[in-house]
Image (tube, grey):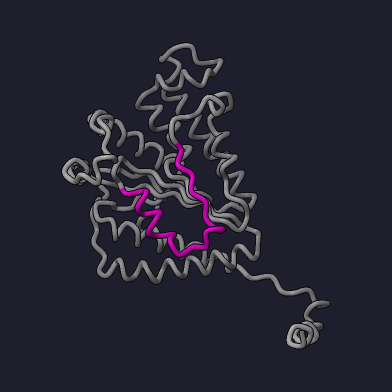
Amino acid sequence: MNNYQVTSNIKLSEHNTKEIKKNAKKKLKKLRKEISEVQDTMYAEGKYAVLICLQGMDTSGKDSLIREVFKDVNARGVEVHSFKVPTELELKHDYLWRHYIALPAKGKIGIFNRTHYENVLVTRVHPEYVFSENIPSIKSLDDLNVDFYNKRMEEINNFEKHIANNGTIILKFFLNLSKDEQKNRLLRRLRLKQKNWKFSPGDLKERKLWDKYQFCYQELLNKTSKEYAPWYVIPADDKPTARLLVAQTILNTLQQFNFKEPELPEKYKVEIENYKSQLENE
């Protein structure tokens, strides 16, 4: 059993945010090459897709994790989607639509950098955002109660079960960052001129809502971690260790599926020597 997997109700306050693995960078280099090889075979087999979901507070390291873990995967085999504020078109559909159309095709790894869980996270911290969805049953803030968000989480569970039943392997990672480490990373963005562009005053406003976000994360982790779509709480204060843990989890999971490259049809197999001869005698 993976020690980081959410298999029963947890309290985030009891989870470590910092863990140090020796030689994490060196070990990651080996793992990401193995992930690439597994993805090549998965692509050739064409039966499964992989969906990696990344969530975490601002500065938790999602972007750099994607870069470092997947840099050796063939470009044709990995797709990254970063979900921002919904567009006008997206708001004309239900809240899961934009995520559904971004799902990876069979043979590919899809990465959601921020995910469909923003709909029970940011919109729960800022319920007024839901009004832009123009949901007929939502008339006031009173309608955006616990039942509303519990129903959404149930809908998300059903969405994930549906795609899992149809060949999508789902792995969800919460990068568990401490408030002190976030402070250090925000200060770094301000102190280093080349990092200034990453800073937004909005980061400080959201930081004041830290406890609300932690409550919402704990709720979604406890209610949406399923055998077919598990959550993993990854200590994120040390970036090399967080990347290594995510890579290990991905590789260990994919290896269990024992992907196989398809064999040549028998009618082509018996002609291999003939084909070689034709090419060699050109």
Residue displayed at 45% across by 47% down: 53
Q: Which residues are magenta?
A: 61-83
Q: Position of residue 253 (x, y in %)?
A: 49, 62
Q: Is residue 80 magenta?
A: yes
Near-viewer residue (271 or 240): 271
Q: Quadrant of residue 49?
A: bottom right
Residue located at (41% from left, 14% from top): 142
* Percent coordinates x, y for residue 45 in the rendering: 65, 65
Q: Nearer the viewer, residue 272 or 58?
A: 272
| Residue that extends furthest to the top in the rendered view of this protein | 139
Q: Residue most toward the right?
A: 267
Q: Quadrant of residue 76?
A: bottom right
Is residue 184 visible from the viewing direction of this image?
A: no
Residue displayed at 50% across by 49% down: 229
- List x then y, in percent, for residue 46: 65, 60
The residue located at (47%, 24%) in the rendering is: 148
Q: Is residue 74 visible?
A: yes
Residue 67, x across and y down, in percent: 39, 56
Quadrant (top left/top right/bottom left/bottom right) for the C terminus: bottom right
Q: Is residue 226 magenta?
A: no
- The total of numbered circles placed on residues is 0
**Is residue 82 or residue 281 the one in the foreground?**
281
Task: Residue at the far front: name it.
Answer: 282
Asked if residue 192 lies left or right of residue 197, the reply is: left
Query: In what quadrant of the picture does the N terminus appear?
Result: bottom left
Name which quarter of the figure residue 44 lies in.
bottom right
98 versus 75 height, above or below:
above
